Image: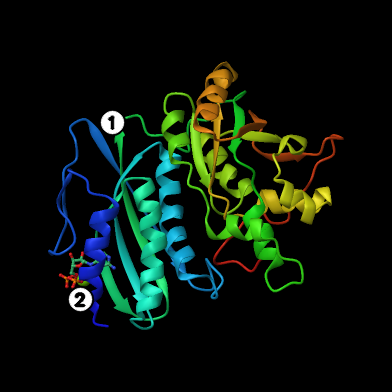
Amino acid sequence: MAEFDWIDWLRERARESAARPDVGLGIGDDCALLDVPEGMQLAVSTDTLVAGVHFPPETAAADIGYKALAVNLSDLAAMGAEPAWFSLALTVPEMEWDWLRGFADGLLELAKEHDIALIGGDTTRGPLSITVTVHGLVPAGQALRRRGARVGDDIWITGSPGDAAAALRQLGGPMQSMKLRHRLNRPTPRVQAGLALRGLAHAAIDVSDGLAQDLGHILAASGVGAELDLGRLPVSSSLLDFFPDDDARWRLQLAGGDDYELCFTAPASEAFAIELAMAQLGVSASVIGHITAEPGLRCLRPDGGELVLEHAGYRHFEAHVH
Ligand code: ADP
Ligand code: MG
């Protein structure tokens, strides 16, 4: 299949999945032309997925497509930005129709769900790698940032972390949970939750590299510390089934990564409003600790003992135990 057949096909499919009036010119010219509404800021973010690094090589094409957009939508969610447009730089070893169609199915299924339009990209030959750039809209000055956490703030997490890391751990082993695997392959970007948190949260981040490490970014940017109450860390029933040992499970939840949940801080006075907003969206959210003046992150077991982490999360350029 020729590259241009693929682009023509993709253009049609993209149009069906999200037709937005603010796309002046989409796929087909040298640039896309987009209308940014008055008073809004453009929130832009890029994430790359590389085969064997960000997903196991045997991952289904549709799951790869889904995840490539999901991890980028998660960044928009963390800023409280509404998804608008995205571009796709796709590097594939060959133009294999079945793979491309599967990939586009997963990608555009999620695009449709969030009304985000594919407006351009690039298609090249090479080892499988997918780079998505998302563009979102946020009222000027209202984006959620990493800085802004204040001493005494509650620390919250959406959903329950650790499932994706657990699935990675199980890969190739005798015990594999389909539920955990699904969390790894199809993470849920918390876009609506992020929008609802504007004006409520002081600081926010999405958890991609591990809760401890990503919360650490909030702490560093805000010049504060934190205490986490491990007994309050929400846990899925599958994770509990497969990882009954508390310390081992907490380590997965704190340092595993690939969760794409939102970690945010907010004053206790907003706790009720947050509970209500999350309940209306059907998103679970839990307070798991609080911000302290003393710098650093302390993770406390229910008995008061501290769990010391050798690895706070995933780092591409360091030897680590995952
Ligand atoms: P150019 O050589 O001018 O960069 P291309 O041949 O790379 O043009 O792309 C032609 C059109 O198809 C452009 O509008 C580009 O944005 C779009 N396009 C190419 N690859 C993709 C892709 N993987 N996803 C979405 N749009 C793509
Ligand atoms: Mg090009």
Q: Nearer the viewer, residue 74 or 304?
A: 74
**What residue sits 37% from the left and 34% below the top?**
143
* Tag of residue 69: none
**224 up-or-down from 164: above or below:** above
Of circles 2 and 1, the one toward us is 2
Residue 135, how many percent across, how many down? 30, 48
**Of the residues shown, which amino acid type is indicated by label 1?**
Ala
Q: Which residue is tagged 2?
A: 4
- Label 2 CB-ligand 1 distance < 8 A: yes
Q: Is residue 318 left or right of residue 13?
A: right
Residue 121, how many percent across, how many down? 26, 64
**Of the residues shown, which amino acid type is indicated by label 2?**
Phe
Q: Which residue is tagged 1?
A: 140
Does residue 321 show up? no
Dot 1: element: loop
**186 up-or-down from 102: above or below:** above
Does residue 4 show up? yes
**54 up-or-down from 218: above or below:** below
Give the mark nearest the N terminus, 2 or 1: 2
- Residue 172 sits in quarter: bottom right
**What residue sits 70% from the left and 64% below the top?**
169
Q: Residue furthest right?
A: 303
Residue 313, how many percent across, how many down? 63, 55
Question: Quadrant where the C terminus lies?
Answer: bottom right
Give the class, few, some or many, for how many residues have Cα within 10 Å of label 2's Cα (few <14, many ≥20): few
The reply to whether discs 2 and 1 touch (Cβ–Cβ < 8 Å) is no
**What residue sits 63% from the left and 35% below the top?**
225
Q: Nearer the viewer, residue 170 or 265?
A: 170
